[in-house]
Image (cartoon, rainbow, N blue to C red):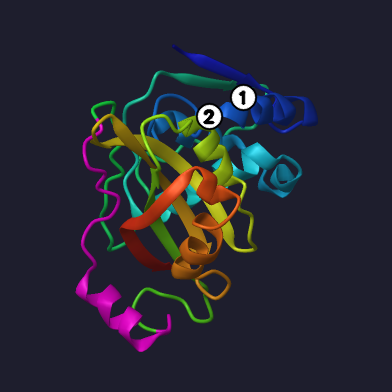
Amino acid sequence: MAVTFYDLNFTSGLKKLDEYLLSRSYITGYQASKDDLTVYSALPTALLDEYLNVSRWYKHIDALLRISGVSSEGYGVTVEGSLIVEPIATPPAADTKAVVAEDDDDDDVDLFGEETEEEKKVRGTGNCSEGFWEKERIWEIICSVGCKPWDDETDMKKLEEAVRSVEMEGLLWGAFKLVVVGYGIKKLQIMLTIVDDLVSVDTLIEERLTVEPINEYVQSCDIVAFNKICK
């Protein structure tokens, strides 16, 4: 179904978009698409911090563009009453290739592609001074974490809310899906972006996601996919 947004350069338009994204990870569908790029390109970044849901979505799409392709499919989005920059058809040039796969069949999610030799070399040095990386930039980790409930009677909506309730400087929650584990049990598989100097994935799991009060819903967590990039 086509969607139209108005006046994204003004408070009224951004407020409507913020309300629209309250219950959505993407503009349309269940994965990043050209619809997200259309809106992404039309937004005035200087105003985004005032709108929590828009800011969350924008940072998530920005992170995806750094590491992966975005689907060329979409339902069709129109932005009216704004000065729109022509949406890019492909992400900025980079040597990392990945596809974000999210579908309704609960297949495995392939979040990241293979690192190039140049990226491995840079990562190994612990800095961003070589190749196409610029100096004095920040390492970010984009990963997918699986949160397993106690049983098939666990309220997965409340489990998701409990996981997202964890707030830390440098932590940004992204899209999620439910993946079948077995015996009627599904686990929450959720993407997140963290600043490496501020948040440890192990600490996040051991000290926040598997302790009270969240362990009322979450039995255990595991890292499904992991990639370290330079912002």
Query: For the magenta stretch, what is the residue range?
Result: 106-129
Marks 1 and 2, Cα distance to the nearest angstrom? Answer: 7 Å
Residue at image position (40%, 85%) is: 126
**Is 83 or 110 nearer to us in this picture?**
110
Residue at mark 1: 20
**Is 42 or 154 nearer to us in this picture?**
154
Bin the neighbour count of mark 2 within 10 Å (Cα to Cα): few under 14, some 14-19, many 20 and up.
Answer: some
Spot occupied by residue 123 in the image (x, y as percentages of width and height): 34, 79
Residue at mark 2: 24
In this rendering, position of residue 7 left or right of residue 132: right
Spot occupied by residue 95 in the image (x, y as percentages of width and height): 27, 63
Residue at image position (51%, 63%) is: 204
Amino acid bearing label 2: Arg
Figure label count: 2
Residue at image position (48%, 30%) is: 155
Bin the neighbour count of mark 1 within 10 Å (Cα to Cα): few under 14, some 14-19, many 20 and up.
Answer: some
**Is 225 or 183 nearer to us in this picture?**
183
Q: Above or below — where is 228 with respect to 68?
A: below
Residue 92 visible? The answer is: no
Residue at image position (65%, 63%) is: 169
Residues marked 1 and 2 touching at CB (< 8 Å): yes
Q: Is residue 175 magenta?
A: no
